[in-house]
Structures are given as C-alpha cells and as structure tokens.
Image: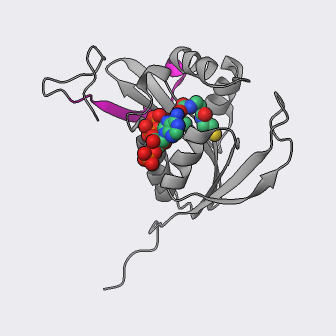
Amino acid sequence: MAEKAGKPGKRNNGEIKVVFTEMKMEHLGQVLEIEERSFPSPWSYQAFACEILQNPLAFYVVAVAGEKVVGYAGMWVVLDEAHITNVAVHPGWRKMGLGRALMQELIRRAARRGVARITLEVRPSNAAARRLYAALGFEEAGLRKNYYIDNNEDAIIMWKEVWSNHGKGVSL
Ligand SMILES: CC(C)(COP(=O)(O)OP(=O)(O)OC[C@H]1O[C@@H](n2cnc3c(N)ncnc32)[C@H](O)[C@@H]1OP(=O)(O)O)[C@@H](O)C(=O)NCCC(=O)NCCS
C-alpha cells in the first residue's frame, strides 16, 4: 500500500502493513465507529454480535493496521452462493486500495469454502462502491425497487462468478 505518515502499522520501509483476520467480539467497538461513519442506517452493536455469535452462515473479516481496525467486510454463505452483507473502510483509510484488498480477501475465503457465485446490492448513488465492485468483476443483474429504507433508493443487484477448485482436485 502507499506510504501514509503517522498511521499505525507503518513499517521502516514506508509501507503500511495491514493484516486480515476473522472478526471477533473484541473488534466490535472499532467496527461500530467505522460503521457509523459509513452508512446512513448503520448496523447496531447487537446486529454485529448476532452475526458473530449466532449466525452460522455469516463470515466477517477485519483489516487491522497495528492495533487499529481500518476496515471490514462480511458475507452469508448458503451452499455454493455467498451474499455480501457489508463492506466499509475507515474514512481516513479510503482510496488506498484497502477496499479492493478486503473484497479480494473475502472472495478468496469464499472460494475456499466452495462458493461459486457471489451477489451483493449497491446504491446507484454510491459511485465508490460501484467502481470497486465493477473492478472486481461484479456485473449488474437487475434492480430491487425502493430497497433502502432511509431514502427509498433502489438497489442494483450485482453478481460475480468465482473460480473455485475447492474439493475438485486436479487432472494430470
Ligand atoms: C466503498 C469503499 C469500501 C471503497 O473503499 P476504498 O478503500 O476507498 O476503495 P479502494 O481504494 O480499494 O478503491 C477501489 C476502487 O474504487 C474507486 N473509488 C474509491 N473511492 C471512490 C470515490 N469516492 N469515487 C469514485 N471511485 C472511487 C477507486 O478509484 C478504485 O477504482 P480503480 O481501481 O478503478 O481506480 C469505501 O468508500 C467505503 O467504506 N464507503 C462507505 C461504505 C460503503 O459505501 N460500502 C459499500 C456499501 S454497498
């Protein structure tokens, strides 16, 4: 990632080291801070806690720089399909490639679980997210009318096929 002065996780060579790890309860304080700065109708602490503790279909990843959570993304996996539920990057860490890296990490982890297709919804007005998803190969496949309750905005439905060799072995 590009050099950025004064950030936790900064190494001697000027690079910032960000690691990806499964979201745990201990991350939720910092996750909530990002969530509230990122969405008009943020998820509550309880909503994230339910995902982590009670939803066997849910899987969430956090990006951590030093001790600081700088982004997160998550999905529900049902058989060979995944539904991205949430992705956000801390406002001070955007436009550095972290959103793309987070999504790539989630897609890798989905592929390892045998996921063949991934879907998500995005607001037509969310240029940053639409550009990110398009760059990752997600394609628009329709609209959900009046999907977002805060302003009745439609949702664009996107899908991506995932190449996965999970459990299939190789032919020599
Ligand atoms: C969407 C979001 C996760 C992108 O994170 P990010 O770390 O800034 O993204 P990246 O730096 O990896 O950039 C990925 C792509 O998006 C583009 N992009 C990022 N911010 C952009 C902006 N404000 N406007 C237009 N394009 C933007 C980048 O140029 C890049 O495209 P490129 O590779 O074609 O140049 C971040 O803006 C965010 O957290 N937004 C608030 C939460 C949100 O809207 N989540 C998505 C809900 S569907």
Q: Is residue 72 left or right of residue 123?
A: left
Q: Is residue 106 above or below residue 43?
A: below
Task: From this view, report whether residue 64 is shown above or below residue 130.
Answer: above
The image shows residue 54, relative to residue 45, as above or below, that is below
Residue beneath the point at 51% across and 32% down? 72
Work out whether residue 60 can be spotted.
Answer: no
Q: Residue at x 48, y 67 (%)?
A: 163
- Residue 159 lies in the magenta stretch: no
Q: Considering only vertical position in the picture, is 86 above or below 117?
A: above
Does the magenta portion include 22? yes
Q: Residue at x 71, y 53 (%)?
A: 157
The quarter of the rendered structure image containing the C terminus is: bottom left
Q: Position of residue 89 (x, y in %)?
A: 50, 29
Front position in the image: 75 or 135: 135
The percent position of residue 61, horizontal first and vertical second, equals 49, 36
Magenta highlight range: 15-28
Outermost residue to the left: 13
Nearest the eye: 72 or 136: 136
> Residue 105's x, y, as percent?
43, 46
Residue 166 in sight from this viewpoint: yes
Quarter residue 138 falls in: bottom right
- Number of callouts: 0
Quarter of the image that includes the N terminus: top left
Q: How is the image coloured?
A: one colour
At 72% from the left and 50% from the top, the residue drawn is: 156
Q: 111 left or right of 35? A: left
* Rendering coords of residue 88 (x, y %): 55, 31
Residue ranking furthest to the bottom: 172
